[in-house]
């Protein structure tokens, strides 16, 4: 049964002038109106399983997913294709993989053995699997298309023969840009170091930027065969006969042969021809692209001309999307193997929150996904938005983005029945080292009027917070409670400090809940100053409260800071707290 909050979220999102998803959906639906009846609208994404498919790549899928989902909400049939570029070449051996994998450089990713220790048969399947699992958890419904299967089955044969017949026309299109200086992705972006690094990684990770466009000293050929002897693409086409489709090539391994392209299924079109060919073949209406594909002479710009001049079709609507940054982990570098992928994010945050990060920003706007302490602030913001939605006080744009995050056209995503604050759950896990009985003991005391009765009520959020504590909080930042009272510090306390501790201990029983302890902690300095409980804090009162809190942290943890005190006190329990505070 949906929660009260879910019932307030409309199944069909309202349209807004600032709603980028609805705007693209309007354009795509209008474009598709000219199609024959019964043909579905097609949105598309492309992913290369050449390495970890990171959170920047997720934007390649999330952007068309949101548009496709909006189209479905309006009652139109819409297919979201994900092209797995598993027939791309293996370009280099990543750091951390045995150097012997160098013998596979130039082979299709689907023919390269998986990294050592993998449960999968190929390099491509090893990196596709976690992405497919993450898409399922995120509620992203796609139809996967293996480019290995497409090329080796002969599905593109007519398109390949057409491209070879029109090779002079394609060469002329590419020639319009070969003499132009194309700015690098880094130059096109702001000079922020993080964005520059993300640009470098995106250009590297796409595999397209470094691929040749088919030009060679012996003429232009947009088709690149894989050698039938060594299976690599270290080949050079030396001749082609349009009438017989006889194609001759040589390979760096020494092999040479002539094949009939009308029958040959061990090769592929070069990237700048392959992409527009697929647009035409799949009749794609919408497909975004990263900033590395949208500069003058890049694959999206050139592809728009090739699809019209060669394949006789219309280029899809294709917004450019910006990079996704990471706080708290290494920058997204697939080649170094230290890149966080969507499944990493889903281990520390719930799927609706991750969807929200992508839905609330327009594609050209960059944003950051937090793996550090910032995730607590992010969850505070998310929960505050949920409360605004529940009370009907959220703005239109906020409501629309929230609606896209928590549900799809098929229905709501799973949610936590008792969504307690993430930072509180993380603190409890940290203090108790994740001991289930201790965690439940504390959670039962958070709200004595409506206590948590089982840990399942706080899942999956509790599990996400626990994983974040275990994997992302450095050892030096973990909470370590004193084993024995600090006798020296207790002996040195003045009368005012002793009084503050006495007032705190005297009020514990009456205020033993999260809300009650919060009131008590802030109220002790007020009481000492002879102020009423509801007084507006002055700078002097705030200073006194800070001094009191520091004293408690020093006595309980031996440091000046720590988790929020109400949570800490609940976790410690009354007896241990009294012992450490000298009471």
Image (tube, rainbow, N blue to C red):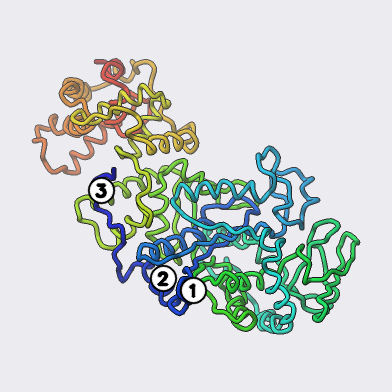
Q: How many marks?
A: 3
Q: Residue at x 72, y 59 (%)?
A: 89
Residue 562 vs residue 575, the one in the foreground: 575
Q: Position of residue 172 (x, y in %)?
A: 70, 84
Q: Identify the residue under disc 1.
A: 317
* Residue that mark 2 sits on: 24
Q: Which residue is drawn at 69% across and 79% down?
A: 178
- Measure the C-alpha gap from mark 1 to mark 3: 35 Å
For mark 2, does the 10 Å Cα neighbourhood hold few (<14), some (14 to 19), or many (20 or more) residues? many
Spatial CA distance of label 3 from label 2 is: 28 Å
Could you tell me if the residues under marks 2 and 1 are in contact, i.e. CB atoms within 8 Å? yes
Whichever of labels 2 and 1 marks the residue nearer the N terminus, that label is 2
Q: In this view, does 131 lie to the left or right of 496?
A: right
Expressed as whole percent of the image width and height from the top left, the position of residue 564 reads 31, 34
The kind of secondary structure element at disc 3 is helix
User: In the figure, residue 50 lies in which quadrant?
Assistant: bottom right
**Residue 5, numbered circle:** 3
Q: Residues within 10 Å of mark 1 (few under 14, many from 20)?
A: some
């Amino acid at each position: 049964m949906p929660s009260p909050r879910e019932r307030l979220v409309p199944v069909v999102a309202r349209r807004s002038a600032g709603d980028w998803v609805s705007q693209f959906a309007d354009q795509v639906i209008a474009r598709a109106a000219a199609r024959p009846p019964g043909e579905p609208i097609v949105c598309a994404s492309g992913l290369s399983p050449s390495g970890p498919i990171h959170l920047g790549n997720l934007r390649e899928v999330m952007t068309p997913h949101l548009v496709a989902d909006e189209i479905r909400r309006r009652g139109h049939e819409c297919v979201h294709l994900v092209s797995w570029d598993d027939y791309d070449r293996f370009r280099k051996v990543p750091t951390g993989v045995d150097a012997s994998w160098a013998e596979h450089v130039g082979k299709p990713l689907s023919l390269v053995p998986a990294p050592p220790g993998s449960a999968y048969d190929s390099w491509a399947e090893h990196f596709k699997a976690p992405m497919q699992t993450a898409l399922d958890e995120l509620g992203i419904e796609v139809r996967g298309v293996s480019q290995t299967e497409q090329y080796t089955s002969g599905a593109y044969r007519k398109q390949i023969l057409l491209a070879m017949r029109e090779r002079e026309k394609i060469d002329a299109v590419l020639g319009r840009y070969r003499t132009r200086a194309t700015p690098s992705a880094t130059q096109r972006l702001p000079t922020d170091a993080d964005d520059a690094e993300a640009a470098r990684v995106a250009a590297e990770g796409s595999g397209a930027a470094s691929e040749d466009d088919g030009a060679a000293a012996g003429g232009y050929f947009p088709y690149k065969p894989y050698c039938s002897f060594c299976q690599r693409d270290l080949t050079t086409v030396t001749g082609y006969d349009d009438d017989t489709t006889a194609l001759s090539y040589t390979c760096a391994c020494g092999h040479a042969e002539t094949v009939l392209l009308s029958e040959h299924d061990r090769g592929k079109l070069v990237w700048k021809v392959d992409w527009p060919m697929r647009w035409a073949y799949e009749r794609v209406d919408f497909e975004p692209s990263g900033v590395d594909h949208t500069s003058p002479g890049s694959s999206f710009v050139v592809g728009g001309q090739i699809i019209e001049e060669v394949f006789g079709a219309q280029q899809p609507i294709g917004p450019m999307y910006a990079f996704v940054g990471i706080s708290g982990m290494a920058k997204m570098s697939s080649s170094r193997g230290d890149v966080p992928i969507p499944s990493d994010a889903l281990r520390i945050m719930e799927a609706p929150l991750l969807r929200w990060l992508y839905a609330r920003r327009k594609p050209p706007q960059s944003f950051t996904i937090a793996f550090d302490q910032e995730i607590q602030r992010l969850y505070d913001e998310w929960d505050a938005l949920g409360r605004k939605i529940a009370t009907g006080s959220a703005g239109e744009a906020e409501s629309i983005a929230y609606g896209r995050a928590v549900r799809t056209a098929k229905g709501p995503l799973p949610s936590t029945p008792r969504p307690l604050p993430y930072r509180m759950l993380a603190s409890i896990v940290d203090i108790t080292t994740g001991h289930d009985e201790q965690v439940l003991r504390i959670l039962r005391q958070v709200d004595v009027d409506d206590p948590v009765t089982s840990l399942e009520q706080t899942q999956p959020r509790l599990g996400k917070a626990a994983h974040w504590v275990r994997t992302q909080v450095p050892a030096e930042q973990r909470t370590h409670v004193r084993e024995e009272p600090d006798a020296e510090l207790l002996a040195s306390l003045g009368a005012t400090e002793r009084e503050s501790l006495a007032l705190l201990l005297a009020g514990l029983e009456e205020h033993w809940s999260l809300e009650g302890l919060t009131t008590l902690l802030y109220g002790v300095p007020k009481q000492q100053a002879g102020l009423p409980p509801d007084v507006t804090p002055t700078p002097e009162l705030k200073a006194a409260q800070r001094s009191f809190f520091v004293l408690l942290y020093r006595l309980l943890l031996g440091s000046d800071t720590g988790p929020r005190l109400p949570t800490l006190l609940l976790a410690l329990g009354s007896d241990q707290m009294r012992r450490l505070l000298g009471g």
